[in-house]
Amino acid sequence: MLCLGFTQQLHAFCLNLKKIPALSFYMCGIIGYVGKNSATPILIDGLKRLEYRGYDSAGIAVRGKSAFTVVRRVGRVDQLAAAVAKAKPVGSLGISHTRWATHGGVTEKNTHPHVSSDGKFALVHNGVIENYQSIKKFLIEKGYTFSSETDTEALSNLIAYHYAKEPQQSGTSCFAESVRKSLLHVQGTYGIAVICLDCPMELVGARKGSPLIIGVGDEENILASDVSAFAMRTRNVVYLNDGEVVHIRPDGFTISTITQEEVAAVVQEVDWNIEDSELGTFKNFMEKEIFEQPAALENAMRGRFSDDGSTAMFGGLNLSSKELRYVDRILLCACGTAWHACLVAEYLIERYARIPVEVEYASEFRYRNAPIDKNTLVFVISQSGETIDTLAALKEAKRKGFRTLAITNSVGSSIARETDGGIYQHAGQEVGVASTKAFTSQILISAMVALYLGRLRDLSYEEGRTMVDALRSVPNHVKEILKQADYIKSIADRYAHFKDFLFLGRQSMFPIALEGALKLKEISYIHAEGYPAAEMKHGPIALICEECPSVFLVTGGEIMQKTLANIQEVKARKGPVIVIGPKHCREEIQADEYIEIPDVHDAVAPILATIPLQLLAYHSAVKLGRDVDKPRNLAKSVTVE
């Protein structure tokens, strides 16, 4: 049982403490190992594969014969690896972490793992412990000391406190129980891996809101926040659910809930191509993933069109055609780049399926109490399937009784398991922080959803066939655009010195303008803004000058002349103009630079317009000497609020 005195005292502290807000929006990488082999090389290799999750500092703790060897360094994993090579930790049990700072600055003292002040426990943590200050205050009064500014150290000492309460029971069972008791008092999110000096071959992990996966091996087991950390060693995995605690040994593991209910483990085999995590001949992962888009788009469509070529098919929606016909409104939720994909989906679904669509930032939706029609379908999009705001929005929609679907690139992710049904992207692992192939895959699948829903309503057979043909042509069109990479590089080289950019488009090109601006900001650190082209004269036109280039996304059809008028407004004020537009419009448009995309169906034009924007951002960043795979202040996904 929990110590009553502790519970009462800690509760009293919490009553007097204002809730501490989360101080960051990123995720970190965790890997722990127990088994027959040396832990150190496995942990370091895993950290290198997880570094896209956070890269301001990294650390490792390996249990030796009588003590932990802890090595921590500020900077990239390579700097840790060099220090570890000198320290030479020896042992078959260890944990490691690559960090993106939440609580506390980027210093060696704040770097994980954190060892309890009695030296008994080492812990790595992803997430935010919101009530850590009250826990810390209580433990200081009990004689525990702290050397960092982190919330994590409070948990390592709290586990030590519980473990010391009954020293006569110290050992394996008490180790796991001490972790469980401690977590009952934690408010916030966590994915943790813990090792104990008294338990030479035991590893304990737990999750709430932050992913943890068990890699099941031969006389060894691994605990990590991502499959990529251990894909070289095993493809057999167990996904932990929120509120679960796992107790791992070399020969097996047991899972229970935080309330001590046993859980039957479900071992799955992941479909993993290790080449996805290798650079090959490319300079970096962003370049590699831009050029992987033809294959990623092909994979998104494979097996998903009807035999007569008039509609799309999806096997995992878990909703019948009849149920979908009763949908009166669709609510799309996402964050960041995925939110831009939702905006494109809004245009496509409303145009081709004639269903009203609303797009919400997931981070806002979860805190609103907006009235939603009972026949609304909630659709979320997340590449990682772990974005905490999107997951929370999904759970809130389910709590209110709405049917939920998801588009995600991660099988076994929290969102994939929480939703009623969904569509897997098959884009392959995306390592670069700035999303490329995942984004275009999301747009393509959104177009297929629009087609599918449209054919359930009033989209004709011929219109369906035309749209299917257009979708099938996308990979080859992307290949043709990628042949212009050197030309786009020359444009980037000429414009990378500018400090401000505007990105402008109409209708479905407006979200692509937003995405183009985001890409340039993310990896080159150039200030950029995206607007509907018609909105330029309602304020942003004040920025137009010789030092502010405008990137226009032009489509053919009825709105082209309107966009041309906007271009003339910029030219009249001596603003440089870069146009991405159809080949047949080139002669008609007066631009300083013109990047051609093929004349295609309106449903797929946003995908093709995205490719030059990615290349423009990429080559601008390279010209400026940026680290395109690991841009400052960013990590791949957002798993803390």
Image (cartoon, helix red, strand yellow):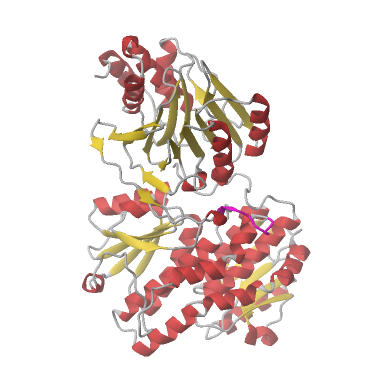
Please tell me whether residue 555 is drawn above or below residue 631 in the rendered image: below
Who is closer to the viewer here, 33 or 322? 33
Relative to 566, is 455 on the left or the right?
left
- Is residue 344 among the parts visible in the rendering? no
- Residue 532, horizontal then vertical, whole percent: 54, 69
Please tell me whether residue 282 is drawn above or below residue 232 in the rendered image: below
Please tell me whether residue 46 is drawn above or below residue 381 in the rendered image: above
- Residue 388, horizontal then vertical, whole percent: 41, 46
- Residue 306, horizontal then vertical, whole percent: 35, 80
Relative to 111, is 412 on the left or the right?
left
Residue at 29% x, 64% y: name it. Answer: 377
Q: Quadrant of residue 219?
A: top left
Residue at 41% x, 35% y: name it. Answer: 190
Who is closer to the viewer here, 175 or 18? 175
User: Magenta residues, as a range?
Assistant: 277-283
Q: Quadrant of residue 162?
A: top left
In magenta segment, residue 281: yes
Residue at 31% x, 56% y: name it. Answer: 419
- Residue 523, horizontal then vertical, whole percent: 64, 54
Who is closer to the viewer here, 267 or 308? 267
How many labels were placed on the picture? 0
Q: Quadrant of residue 465?
A: bottom left
Magenta span: predominant SS is: loop
Q: Quadrant of the N terminus?
A: top left
- Is residue 90 among the parts visible in the rendering? yes
Residue at 51% x, 56% y: name it. Answer: 273
Please tell me whether residue 529 is drawn above or below residue 118 in the rendered image: below
Q: Quadrant of the C terminus?
A: top left
In magenta segment, residue 231: no
The residue lying furthest to the bottom in this view is 462
